Image: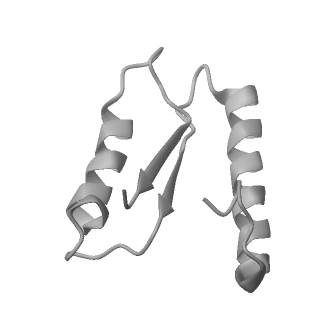
Amino acid sequence: MLYANPTPQVFSLSVVKTAQRNLVQCLRAVYGKEIHVAQVSIGGVVSPDKPRMSPEFVAGRFWELFCEDKGEWRGDVEVLEE
C-alpha cells in the first residue's frame, strides 16, 4: 500500500494516499461514533481477469462497509491481489 510503503516512481501519489489515510483517521476520531467514516485501499489494478481485484469483488468490500452495524464499524479495508 502506498500510504505505508511509498514508491519513488509515484512519489506524489504516495503522499496523497498518506494524506487521505490521515484525513480518514482524523474524521473517525472526531465523528466516528455517530458517522461511519472509512477508507478502502486497493493494492493493485482492478481487473475482471483477477478474482480478488475484479470490479465485483472490490464493490463487495464497499457494500460490506455500508452494511456494518454501528459499533462494529471498521475504518480501513485493504483489497490486495494476493
Q: Is residue 35 left or right of residue 67?
A: right
76 versus 81 height, above or below: above
At 56% from the left and 30% from the top, the residue drawn is: 35
Indicate how the structure is coloured in the image: one colour
At 75% from the left and 48% from the top, the residue drawn is: 23
- Nearest the camera: 19 or 51? 51
Residue 18 position by quadrant:
bottom right
Residue 44 position by quadrant:
bottom left
Q: Residue reaching furthest front?
A: 82
At 33% from the left and 47% from the top, the residue drawn is: 61
Q: Position of residue 1 (x, y in %)?
A: 60, 59
- Nearest the camera: 27 or 2? 2
6 versus 77 height, above or below: below
Q: Residue reaching furthest top?
A: 71
Numbered label tally: 0
Q: Position of residue 38 (x, y in %)?
A: 55, 41
Q: Position of residue 75 (x, y in %)?
A: 56, 35
At 42% from the left and 53% from the top, the residue drawn is: 79
- Nearest the camera: 63 or 35? 63
Q: Residue reaching furthest bottom?
A: 9
Q: Position of residue 57 (x, y in %)?
A: 24, 56
46 versus 76 height, above or below: below
In the picture, which quadrant includes the C terminus?
Answer: bottom left
